[in-house]
Amino acid sequence: MELTMQQREAARASLAARREERLAVLEELIAAGVQVMSEDIYVERSVQVAPGATLLPGTILRGKTIVAEGCVIGPNTLLENAVVGKNTTVNASQVYDSTLGENNKIGPYTHVRKDTVTGYGVHLGAYVETKNSNFAMGNTVSHLTYIGDSDVGKYCNFGCGTVTCNYDGENKFRTTIGDYVFVGCNTNLVAPVTVGDGAYTAAGSTITKDVPAGDMGIARERQTNLEGWAKPKMQAYIAKKQKLEAESK
């Protein structure tokens, strides 16, 4: 539906008023000692940002968000009702209704969902998602991992592709992980399950039973190689690719 001239003017006036209010908030933050690195930043008046924090382009701060001194937020980051401790960076990520501890490194492309709490020095990296989970100090979750409904001890390392399987289609269950645990790549932790202090899980395992402290949990078949099985399957594929390679020269 085409807008009337009066409706267009009203829309322009509304946009202008919102831009003026947004810039007024940014000016107040600058005057208070916040490093505001671009006009392309939106901060609601309910938000608290400490002097010495830095806001990079594309940052959006909403609700009851509190950002402590020394933090670097952005670029392209959304915080909603989030509390962020001193000297924490949140890069190209989204954080909702959660508390991040001091000296955390979050992002890029991290999705921190409701009721996540992190301790000192936690790293949540690329394509990591968390929900309703507690992380003690020093945890490293570098990439491609989902941790939900979990309690994680200190100084644990999560391999790429770890998943806490917390939902059976009807109920949610918790995963408990002790201190100094090494979770191997592509591990499925089927809750409710506990991994004890200093334990390992072998890469590619689906853990359905508790792993005692100091043990290694391994749940996978031994490898079997079928001699010559692939050769006839691959002949046509290899011939096709070799033909394309020859034609490209």
Image: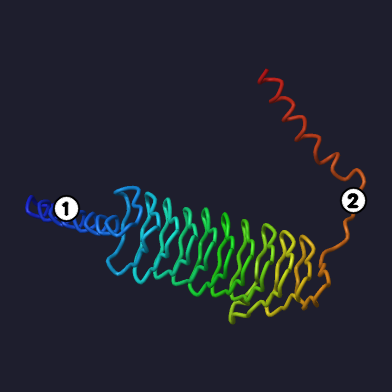
- Residue type, label 2: Asn
Disc 2 element: loop
The number of discs equals: 2
Q: CA distance from mark 2 to mark 1?
A: 68 Å
Left or right of 189, for residue 17: left
Q: Residue at x 34, y 65 (%)?
A: 62
Q: Position of residue 39 (x, y in %)?
A: 29, 49
Mark 2 highlights which residue?
225
Position in image of residue 21 (x %, y %): 20, 58
Q: Residue furthest top?
A: 249
Q: Nearer the viewer, residue 1 or 153?
A: 153
Residue depicted at x 63% and y 65%: 138
For residue 200, side relative to residue 222 (left or right): left
Taking the spot 75% from the left edge, 35% from the top edge, the residue there is 237
Residue type of the residue flagged with mark 1: Ala
Could you say which quadrant of the image residue 31 lies in?
A: bottom left
Question: Would residue 127 be found to the left or right of residue 36 on screen?
Answer: right
Q: Which residue is mark 1?
A: 16
Query: The residue tagged with tag 1: helix, strand or loop?
Result: helix
- Residue that lies at the very extreme toward the right in this rendered image: 227
Asked if marks 2 and 1 touch (Cβ < 8 Å), the reply is no
